[in-house]
Amino acid sequence: MSDTIYLSLGSNLGDKESNIASCIAMLGSYIENTEIRTSSFYLSEPLYNVNQPSFLNIIVELKTVFTPFQFLDKIHDIEKMLGRKLEREKNTPRTIDIDIIMFGNAFIETDKLTIPHSHALLRKFVLVPLAELIPDKVFPGTKYKMIDLLEKCPDTSTVDKYLIDKKA
């Protein structure tokens, strides 16, 4: 049996497009016989610590047979392979950031993992691509569709669709 999961990927160091593309390819190695769906890329200003480069963000949908904790370990492996320092200050620049937003019907709250992601409903860089990819899906634990949650989001940061230059 497999669960559909939604991940938020972000990068604001180095070749952001390549970091995210490499991350998606690595995620693909952990799944079998299924597609990975993605939102568009979005350029978003950093929250909390604004003295850093803008982020490139995307939402990824995939299915997995791993448990949430097994998948978290896989995510940490990918982040490490892509140069992320796991022992770093919070809200600082990073080559890749992978957050589990939703994992099937799971509700988990531990020191190591919280699903659904505890801050997802407060972040436009998560809700904008979610509303694009699955606008009518109800966010777990609420009665609201993604598109409605985006309208209610208190985040006032700028999140713009990012067009990749395919001529390069």
Image (cartoon, helix red, strand yellow):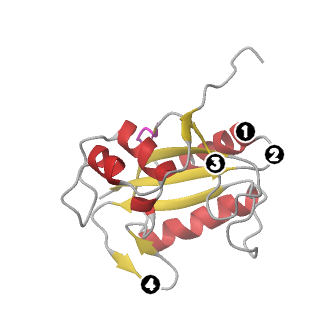
Q: Which residue is mark 2?
A: 14
* Disc 1 from disc 4: Cα separation: 32 Å
Residue in the foreground of this view, choosing between 56 and 95: 56
Q: Please tell me the numbered disc located at residue 18.
A: 1
Instruction: Answer whether residue 115 is magenta in the image.
Output: no
Q: Which residue is mark 4?
A: 110
Identify which residue is drawn at 31% across, 60% down. 104
- Decide: few, some or many residues near mark 1? Use Cα within 10 Å; few <14, some 14-19, many ≥20: few
* Disc 1 from disc 2: Cα separation: 9 Å
N-terminal of the pair, mark 3 or mark 2, is 2
Image quadrant assignment for residue 165? top right
Q: Which residue is mark 3?
A: 45
Magenta stretch, main secondary structure, is loop
Q: Which residues are magenta?
A: 33-37
Q: Please, what secondary structure does the residue beneath circle 3 have?
A: loop
N-terminal of the pair, mark 1 or mark 3, is 1
Kindly report which numbered mark, 1 or 2, lies closer to the viewer in this rendering. Answer: 2
Q: Please, what secondary structure does the residue beneath circle 2 have?
A: loop
